[in-house]
């Protein structure tokens, strides 16, 4: 079944035709064992695929959009990723300039001073000196007008009727993402949920979609197994495999477990796969033509309306939340077609043409190099990202009409934190923009074995990278409990369970970040779920009257 390698691999959409030299995609396989899940291999070079110019142009794009602190971070990555680049002096200067524009005067002073020391003969020295004076003047000004610190007021416990109940804050999550239960009937599933509850798990993230070649839940009736793709809840918008959501919700809620419905978006074209008018459109580098691609065209209003009706039916169930599957993305050559072109023209006043996006699109697909991206490409990629998040917002709105207390999580590739320009270019995905849009949980797919394979790094390096990703995500999101770090429990390539100590060791390291949310993927009945640990309770300061 495809659920997990679509998470992070198949959803990236790198087919053999498109990236033969770099990326390899093996078909999803079916396995009789309950623990066998989704083996797909995706190889990647041990360096970022972007050139130094691409990375710099991405940072310039952010700077021009006035996202100054994010731009400073991305200029820094020019230095980190490309230490021999001739762009390093300009990148260093731009870090200081970005901080200055962000009114982060101390950071600007530090960066501009360092530029003066490192590049005393650079043509930007005079301009740097002037901006350094501005930063220092602003710091002195801040010292003169700084207000005294106010005393800290500690929250007091509520007594009698003196406290007003605030809106319930987002709580840290201890979750298990279920692609399959191992129970053969609902009685056995109930025993599995009992064990999870005792272990301290508080949330089940339940697969409610079924893609072609996915494995069926063991308790699905044989007569329903002839439906190739669909959903596991009642709706008129899609083929229904079987309504498993209702009985599992009843069991889980009876045991005090929350249930998030794990649902597709772009790939929820079940029953309409042959409708060309609803299909995604992509640019084929070989033929230089616009062709159909997998999934729905989310620039087509009819496709979005279809999803709204589908999610409205999902919200008829007493779900506690929804996890948007990672198919809410568009590859670097996807997002064309008449609907996209018309919207892009309307929103930006610019014409969308492949020749304006790819600097060296003439290279064959078998070449090692990827197309270089123009400044127009970055504008288009960011525009696509905003469109995808707008669709998510519309789906959230229809769910909220029936389930106002529902929470929403969005799946994010690990590159959204570790390598944002990579995620923006190849996936039209951005954690920064998702935070601006607003979700209850940001689910970072920190699948360590997958990262080892793709980044060609050892276990220790990957652990350090995941620790840094967690720190960066918490800083960007601002609330640690909203950062949901997801750990893999099986080897995607072999479908064999990973050693428990390997997973729990990494998990316990990340748990050192207070209030962080954690999920393991996929559910394995033999996994030591007690290692997730009960999350601390979130407290909130309330005023008394």
Image (cartoon, rainbow, N blue to C red):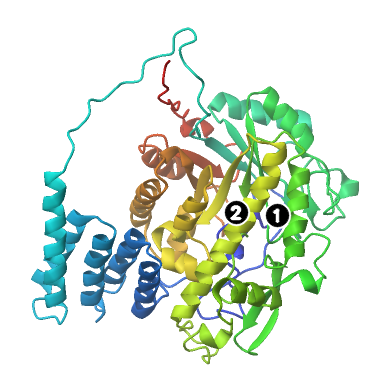
Where the N terminus falls, by quadrant? bottom right
Whether 231 is drawn above or below 115: the answer is above
Whether 169 is drawn above or below 486: the answer is above
Q: Which sits in the foreground, 309 or 532?
A: 309
Whether 134 is drawn above or below 280: the answer is above
* Within-10-Å neighbours for mark 2: few <14, some 14–19, many 20+: some
The percent coordinates of residue 189 (x first, y second) are 72, 32
Name which quarter of the figure residue 279 lies in. Answer: bottom right
Q: Which sits in the foreground, 121 or 174?
A: 121
Q: Which sits in the foreground, 339 or 225?
A: 339
Q: Which residue is mark 1?
A: 31
Where the C terminus falls, by quadrant? top left
Whether 445 is drawn above or below 93: the answer is above
Mark 1 and 2 residues: CB-CB less than 8 Å, in contact? yes
* Residue at the (70%, 69%) spot, across then down: 294
Which structural element holds mark 1? loop
* Residue at the (67%, 50%) spot, across then down: 395
Which structural element holds mark 2? loop
The percent coordinates of residue 31 (x first, y second) are 70, 54
The percent coordinates of residue 303 (x first, y second) are 75, 63
Spatial separation of the CA atoms under disc 1 and disc 2: 9 Å
Residue 94 can be seen, yes or no = yes
Q: Residue furthest top?
A: 160
Count of number-bearing discs: 2
Asked if residue 485 lies left or right of residue 47, the reply is: right
Residue 446 can be seen, yes or no = no
Q: Which residue is mark 2?
A: 495
The percent coordinates of residue 408 (x first, y second) are 59, 43
Name which quarter of the figure residue 190 lies in. Answer: top right
């Amino acid at each position: 079944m495809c659920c997990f390698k679509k998470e992070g691999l198949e959803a990236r959409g790198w087919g053999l035709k498109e990236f033969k030299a770099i990326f390899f995609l093996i078909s999803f396989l079916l396995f009789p064992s309950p623990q066998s899940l989704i083996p797909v291999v995706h190889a990647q070079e041990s360096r970022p695929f972007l050139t130094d110019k691409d990375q710099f142009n991405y940072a310039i794009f952010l700077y021009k959009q006035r996202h100054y602190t994010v731009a400073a971070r991305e200029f820094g990555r020019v230095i980190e990723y490309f230490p021999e680049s001739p762009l390093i002096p300009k990148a260093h200067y731009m870090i200081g300039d970005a901080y200055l524009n962000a009114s982060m005067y101390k950071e600007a002073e530090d960066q501009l001073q360092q530029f003066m020391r490192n590049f005393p003969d650079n043509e930007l020295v005079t301009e740097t000196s002037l901006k350094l004076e501005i930063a220092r003047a602003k710091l002195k000004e801040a010292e003169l007008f700084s207000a005294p610190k106010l005393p800290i007021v500690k929250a007091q416990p509520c007594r009698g009727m003196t406290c007003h109940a605030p809106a319930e804050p987002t709580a840290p999550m201890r979750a298990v993402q279920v692609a399959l239960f191992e129970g053969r009937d609902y009685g056995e599933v109930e025993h599995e949920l009992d064990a999870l509850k005792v272990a301290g798990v508080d949330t089940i993230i339940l697969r409610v979609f079924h893609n072609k070649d996915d494995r069926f839940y063991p308790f699905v009736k044989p007569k329903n197994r002839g439906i190739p793709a669909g959903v596991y809840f009642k709706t008129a918008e899609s083929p229904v495999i079987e309504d498993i959501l209702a009985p599992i919700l009843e069991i889980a809620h009876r045991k005090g477990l929350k249930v998030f419905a794990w649902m597709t978006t772009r790939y929820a074209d079940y029953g309409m796969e042959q409708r060309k008018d609803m299909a995604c459109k992509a640019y084929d580098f070989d033929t230089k033509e616009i062709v159909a691609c997998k999934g729905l065209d989310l620039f087509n209003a009819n496709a979005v309306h279809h999803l709204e009706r589908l999610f409205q039916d999902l919200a008829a169930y007493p779900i506690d939340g929804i996890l948007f599957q990672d198919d809410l993305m568009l590859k670097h050559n996807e997002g064309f077609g008449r609907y996209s072109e018309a919207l892009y023209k309307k929103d930006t006043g610019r014409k969308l043409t492949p020749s304006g996006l790819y600097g060296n699109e003439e290279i064959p697909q078998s070449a090692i190099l990827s197309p270089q991206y123009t400044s127009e490409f970055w504008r288009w990629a960011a525009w696509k990202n905003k469109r995808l998040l707008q669709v998510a917002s519309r789906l959230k709105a229809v769910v909220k009409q029936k389930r106002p207390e529902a929470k929403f999580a969005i799946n994010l590739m690990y590159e959204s934190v570790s390598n944002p320009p990579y995620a923006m270019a190849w996936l039209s995905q951005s954690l920064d923009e998702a935070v601006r849009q607003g979700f209850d949980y940001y689910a970072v797919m920190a699948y360590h074995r997958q990262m080892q394979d793709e980044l060609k790094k050892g276990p220790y390096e990957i652990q350090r990278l995941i620790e840094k990703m967690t720190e960066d995500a918490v800083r960007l999101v601002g609330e640690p409990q909203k950062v949901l770090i997801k750990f893999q429990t099986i080897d995607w390539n072999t479908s064999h369970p990973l050693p428990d100590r390997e997973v729990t060791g990494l998990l316990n390291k990340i748990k050192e970040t207070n209030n962080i949310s954690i999920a393991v993927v996929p559910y394995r009945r033999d996994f030591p779920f007690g290692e997730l640990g009960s999350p601390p309770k979130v407290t909130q300061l309330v005023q008394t009257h």
